[in-house]
Image (cartoon, rainbow, N blue to C red):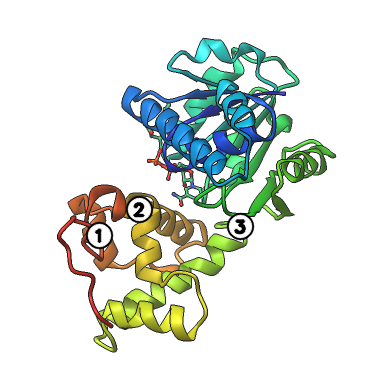
Amino acid sequence: MIIGIIGSGAMGAGIAQVVATAGHTVRLLDQNAQALQRAGSAMQASLTRLAEKGKLTTEAAAATFARLHLTQDVTTFGDCELVLEAIVEDLAVKQQLFREVEMLVSDTCILASNTSSLSIASIAAACRKPERFIGIHFFNPAPIMQLVEVIPAVQTRAGLAEEVRDLVQSWGKLPVLTRDTPGFIVNRVARPFYGEAIRILEEGIADLATIDWAMTELGGFRMGPFALMDFIGHDVNYRVTESVFASFFYDPRFKPSFTQKRLFEAGYYGRKSGRGFYSYAADAVPPEP
Ligand code: NAI
């Protein structure tokens, strides 16, 4: 199968690795040449590491990398059988992208979004053939995280969700079918996880290192809420919070916080920018709980 992925940031690059490893030819596109090069180098480095650890033969690593085609030219997507986008979390931008993609691909090409919070129906509505549209939502980092949410929209044709679920399963992932509701399963459950943690901080109940420590050491979570928000990126995470809040008709349970909004406005996106709730500068001292 030939799969087109649009957006080669944190998610698109990881998803490209997953599907190339599963044996598909991948066309990976980004409007930013640097992001594209970074994705290519990261995938090569990751495959080399796997080969060094003996999890992949050197030949298999080379063959996987050879299946990846980096491009800035969307007209090369004409032969794709599935196009999945992982670009900025902005409805109008995603809709415009699919209007362009639909002019290039065949009528049987499946179109999919990796959106965390936008309604699949609203993105599909921009398409000429919305019945071939579906949500395929990976988690970060895509090569490692097992879970993938598969989200049919009201317009999605009968049977496509099951086809996509089986395809995702063939990639070695654990797909779960979910309804097209704000945040689907995981991001809905995760909003109060982040939101309450920030409120505990704002109310002075504990500092952020203590909250993270408690959630990992006592709560059994892999990452505490602040470390996880910094990992995801506040540009992405804040937008998702705003979107879920608005989508639930401004239900106060999902209200965003000014603390995170200010980080977002300042460009303190977390790991990716070197500063978020924590500092990731080389000389930064990690806070003690
Ligand atoms: P990112 O900011 O790391 O990457 C986005 C990439 O898309 C950038 O390289 C940018 O240059 C490119 N881009 C933006 N607009 C474009 C366009 N019109 N055409 C071509 N390329 C374009 O973002 P990230 O984190 O990879 O998120 C992407 C999507 O995946 C979002 O919808 C987000 O909600 C979703 N998502 C993010 C997760 C996360 O933990 N970061 C987890 C699951 C889903």
Element assignment for label 1: loop
Callout in the foreground (3, 1) = 1
Q: Given the image, on which type of amino acid does mark 1 rest? A: Gly
- The answer to whether residue 12 shows anywhere in this view is no
Q: CA distance from mark 2 to mark 1?
A: 8 Å
Mark 1 crowd level (few <14, some 14–19, many ≥20, 10 Å Cα) = many
Q: CA distance from mark 3 to mark 1?
A: 26 Å
Residue at horizontal 45 percent and vertical 78 percent from the top: 216
Element assignment for label 3: loop
Element assignment for label 2: loop
Q: Quadrant of ligand 1?
A: top left
Q: Nearer the viewer, residue 54 or 80?
A: 54
Query: Disc 3 designates what residue?
Result: 184
Residue at horizontal 40 percent and vertical 26 percent from the top: 36
Query: Disc 2 designates what residue?
Result: 233
Horizontal side, residue 80 vs residue 267: left or right: right
Horizontal side, residue 218 vs residue 129: left or right: left
Query: Disc 1 designates what residue?
Result: 276
